[in-house]
């Protein structure tokens, strides 16, 4: 292949999130929660690497959910849910943006974009509730792109997380004020680290006004790792923990 100008190299950790996820999975039929499915982009992306996966996709907007259904109708073992996930069951007002990927329960902040076109009352469930109702005993990958609502999603998965039933968490983390009342990265990081997760990597970073805007982060639960001496030691702050991991 080198005669033709090509080479084969091993993908280094931290370059491809799908490859990193696959390196931690213990089976070929992962159960995936796709929170914030939008129009099905993540379904196609995940199935490209995990064709035998069972995916539960959650999209609260009725209009966007219709597009999601049309775009993914050919997939097997795909369960579509027209609801949001949060910390407690109930109903909330979704601020629907003209840019569907920006719709959120949080108002737009200084760095946000698009325009709110309507407010729609939607159903909110929890990860634990779905798992109880559907008799789901594990989640191999919990992907969350809930536009600033991700911490609430994780709070609603407390029972599954505390019982070591969630292996990987892939989440969009935001650094700029895209939404008002947005939890900080430190809050999100501490919540996961204090529940046994470890940071695998950040991936491509996007910028707003020359500053870090948002990126995707992958976390793995310690139960998916080989235990080593001192593995349970926890520094006092998320910054110290991040430094120690690197």
Image: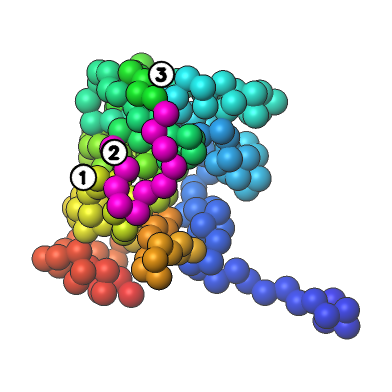
Picture disc at residue 107: 2
The x and y percentages for residue 162 are: 23, 40
The quarter holding residue 3 reads bottom right
Query: In which quadrant is the N terminus drawn?
Result: bottom right
Q: Are marks 3 and 1 in contact (CB under 8 Å)?
A: no
Colouring of the image? rainbow
Is residue 219 positioned above or below 144 on the image? below
Picture disc at residue 181: 1
Query: In which quadrant is the C terminus drawn?
Result: bottom left
Residue 55 as seen in the image, left or right of residue 167: right
Q: Secondary structure at mark 1?
A: loop
Q: In the image, what residue occupies the spot 39% across and 66% down? A: 209
Q: Which residue is mark 3?
A: 134
Picture disc at residue 200: none
The x and y percentages for residue 9 are: 67, 74
Give the Cα separation between the discs numbered 2 and 3. Answer: 32 Å
Q: Secondary structure at mark 3?
A: helix
The boundaries of the magenta stretch are: 106-117
The x and y percentages for residue 100 are: 49, 35
Q: In the image, what residue occupies the spot 27% across and 22% down? A: 92
Observer-side mark, 2 or 3, equals 2
Is residue 62 positioned above or below 41 on the image? above
Give the Cα separation between the discs numbered 3 and 1. Answer: 33 Å
- Estimate how packed mark 2 is, as few (under 14), some (14 to 19) or many (20 or more) residues with alpha carbons within 10 Å: some
Is residue 178 positioned above or below 107 on the image? below
Q: Main secondary structure of the magenta part?
A: loop
- Residue in the foreground of this view, choosing between 158 and 62: 62
Residue 205 as seen in the image, left or right of residue 10: left
- Residue in the foreground of this view, choosing between 208 and 58: 208
- Residue in the foreground of this view, choosing between 168 and 242: 242
Observer-side mark, 2 or 1, equals 2
Q: In the image, what residue occupies the spot 23% across and 31% down? A: 87
């Amino acid at each position: 292949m080198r005669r033709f100008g090509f080479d084969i190299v091993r993908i280094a950790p931290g370059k491809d999130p799908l490859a990193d996820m696959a390196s931690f999975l213990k089976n070929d039929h992962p159960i995936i929660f796709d929170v914030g499915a939008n129009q099905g982009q993540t379904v196609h992306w995940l199935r490209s690497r995990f064709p035998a996966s069972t995916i539960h996709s959650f999209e609260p907007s009725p209009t966007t959910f219709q597009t999601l259904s049309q775009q993914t109708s050919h997939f097997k073992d795909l369960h579509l849910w027209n609801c949001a996930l949060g910390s407690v069951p109930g109903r909330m007002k979704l601020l629907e943006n003209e840019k569907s990927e920006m719709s959120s329960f949080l108002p737009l902040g200084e760095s946000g974009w698009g325009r709110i076109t309507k407010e729609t009352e939607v159903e909110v469930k929890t990860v634990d509730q779905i798992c109880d109702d559907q008799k789901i005993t594990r989640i191999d990958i919990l992907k969350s792109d809930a536009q600033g609502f991700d911490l609430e999603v994780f709070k609603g998965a407390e029972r599954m997380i505390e019982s070591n039933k969630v292996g990987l968490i892939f989440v969009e983390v935001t650094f700029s004020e895209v939404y008002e009342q947005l939890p900080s990265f430190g809050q999100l990081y501490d919540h996961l680290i204090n529940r046994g997760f470890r940071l695998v990597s950040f991936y491509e970073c996007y910028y707003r006004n020359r500053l870090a805007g948002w990126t995707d982060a992958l976390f793995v639960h310690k139960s998916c790792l080989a235990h080593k001496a001192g593995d349970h030691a926890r520094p006092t702050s998320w910054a110290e923990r991040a430094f120690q991991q690197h």
